[in-house]
Image (cartoon, rainbow, N blue to C red):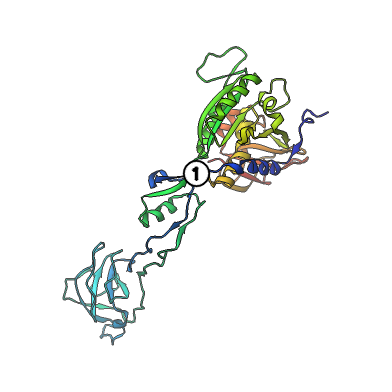
């Protein structure tokens, strides 16, 4: 009998859907933050433009503001039309109206003078440069109206929805909010989590280590992954192989009112699987057809989603990237999805029958090569990787050059 026969078997896609549905109850509230603190956050409300962009007609470049119709007068012997230079229009200053036959030196971003409807670049003028007011300037004929003019509201009209609730705030979106005069934005609060790592064999880094013990890498991995995903860790506990102790710890942590619980370890078939022992009656523990990261669990103690990940360090890391991170993106709107690309293998690789194998790799811009073996304990190899390589189930070796899907970790 298979060692996984006690657990139902799920595909990778099926378990991702299950984790995503488990997180549907996460309901972030709204808070107001400064633009400086809003990068990567998720907008809580639509942003309706309080003004148009551009807020006024302005010049797209340094040149001369003119009435386009005046350039359709008969040109002189040199083929150019004479204009009289008037006062300059610097950016940030309100210009005087422009009369017939006049040309106002104008700087990029400066408001177009009333009456003007085109801008002629300075390099097209004769004699060139920006001569003093009263000088006769010669410009090319037949200038089209609207040339090098940024029209008021052509980017965003006042009253339009400039940004939508649920959008993740990128640099460009923050720039748009700033251009609309917003110093703060309403954003969804960060989901809050309580984190558990398990096992009598595990001790905290820096603590005395017994001869049969190892330092806890999983808490550091998950803390960093949760922080990178925009999740606030309310508390993190190293849980011994004692079901009663874990049950008491879980009951106490429920008072913190987290949005979710996350654990690593204690979910397989061993005699000391405390997470499964405590949560089994109210959850589901399955085996996902994936290596590493086969044993997985989901529960809802006190109605709060609890995502149970396997305990080997690389299994923890891979499971978070394959399930919890994309589920958060789907439900909360952040973090940004990991880039996926299809690239050729740099070497031959043998997949696993009946299971998706998630190998660690390095992408050199041309192909992806494996880093270390498939073992879930090879953390140093995982630390050198910048991609997860998703090998579909199969019996035949995949030769070098075979296209495979990768998940970028950069």
In the picture, which quadrant includes the N terminus? top right
- Quadrant hosting residue 268: top right
Vertical side of 185 occupied by 102: above or below? below
Q: Position of residue 189 (x, y in %)?
A: 48, 42
226 on left or right of 9: left
Q: Residue at x 55, y 33 (%)?
A: 384
18 on left or right of 260: right
Q: Residue at x 41, y 67 (%)?
A: 154
Q: Residue at x 65, y 43 (%)?
A: 21
Q: Position of residue 344 (x, y in %)?
A: 64, 46
Vertical side of 358 occupied by 129: above or below? below
- Quadrant hosting residue 316: top right
218 on left or right of 355: left
Crowding at label 1, few (<14), some or many (≥20) Cα neighbours within 10 Å? few
Looking at the image, which is closer to me, 42 or 174? 42
Residue 409 visible in the shown view = yes
The residue most toward the top is: 211
Vertical side of 66 occupied by 177: above or below? above
Vertical side of 246 occupied by 20: above or below? below
Residue 346 visible in the shown view = no
Looking at the image, which is closer to me, 288 or 185? 185
User: Which residue in the structure is indicated by mark 1?
Assistant: 29
Callout 1: helix, strand or loop? loop
The residue most toward the right is: 1
Q: Position of residue 393 (x, y in %)?
A: 74, 41
Q: Position of residue 301 (x, y in %)?
A: 63, 32
Looking at the image, which is closer to me, 72 or 349? 72
The residue most toward the bottom is: 74
> How many numbered discs, if any?
1
């Amino acid at each position: 009998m298979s060692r996984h026969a006690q657990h139902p078997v799920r595909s990778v896609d099926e378990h991702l859907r299950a984790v995503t549905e488990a997180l549907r109850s996460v309901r972030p509230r709204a808070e107001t933050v400064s633009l400086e603190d809003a990068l990567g956050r998720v907008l809580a409300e639509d942003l309706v433009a309080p003004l148009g962009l551009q807020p006024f007609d302005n010049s797209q470049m340094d040149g001369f503001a003119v009435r386009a119709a005046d350039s359709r007068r008969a040109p002189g012997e040199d083929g150019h039309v004479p204009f009289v230079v008037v006062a300059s229009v610097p950016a940030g200053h309100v210009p005087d109206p422009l009369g017939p036959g006049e040309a106002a030196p104008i700087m990029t971003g400066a408001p177009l003078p009333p009456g003007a409807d085109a801008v002629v670049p300075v390099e097209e003028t004769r004699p060139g440069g920006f001569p003093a007011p009263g000088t006769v300037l010669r410009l090319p004929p037949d200038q089209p109206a609207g040339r090098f003019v940024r029209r008021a509201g052509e980017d965003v009209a006042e009253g339009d929805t400039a940004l939508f609730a649920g959008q993740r705030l990128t640099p460009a979106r923050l720039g748009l909010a700033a251009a609309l005069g917003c110093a703060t934005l309403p954003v969804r609060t960060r989901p809050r989590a309580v984190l558990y790592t398990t096992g009598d064999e595990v001790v905290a880094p820096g603590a005395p280590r017994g001869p049969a013990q190892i330092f806890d890498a999983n808490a550091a991995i998950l803390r960093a992954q949760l922080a990178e995903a925009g999740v606030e860790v309310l508390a993190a506990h190293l849980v011994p192989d004692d079901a009663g102790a874990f049950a008491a710890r879980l009951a106490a942590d429920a008072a913190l009112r987290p949005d979710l619980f996350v654990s690593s370890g204690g979910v397989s078939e061993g005699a000391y699987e405390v997470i499964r022992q405590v949560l089994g009656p109210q959850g589901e523990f399955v085996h996902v057809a994936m290596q590493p990261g086969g044993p997985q669990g989901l529960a809802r103690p006190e109605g709060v989603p609890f995502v149970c990940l396997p305990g080997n360090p690389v299994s923890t890391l891979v499971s978070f990237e394959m399930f919890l991170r994309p589920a958060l993106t789907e439900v909360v709107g952040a973090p940004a999805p990991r880039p996926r690309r299809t690239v050729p293998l740099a070497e031959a690789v043998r997949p696993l029958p009946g299971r998706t194998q998630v190998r660690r790799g390095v992408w050199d811009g041309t192909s992806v090569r494996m880093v270390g073996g498939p073992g879930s304990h090879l953390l140093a190899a995982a630390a050198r990787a910048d991609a997860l390589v998703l090998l579909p189930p199969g019996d035949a070796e995949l030769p070098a050059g075979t296209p495979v899907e990768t998940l970028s970790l950069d």
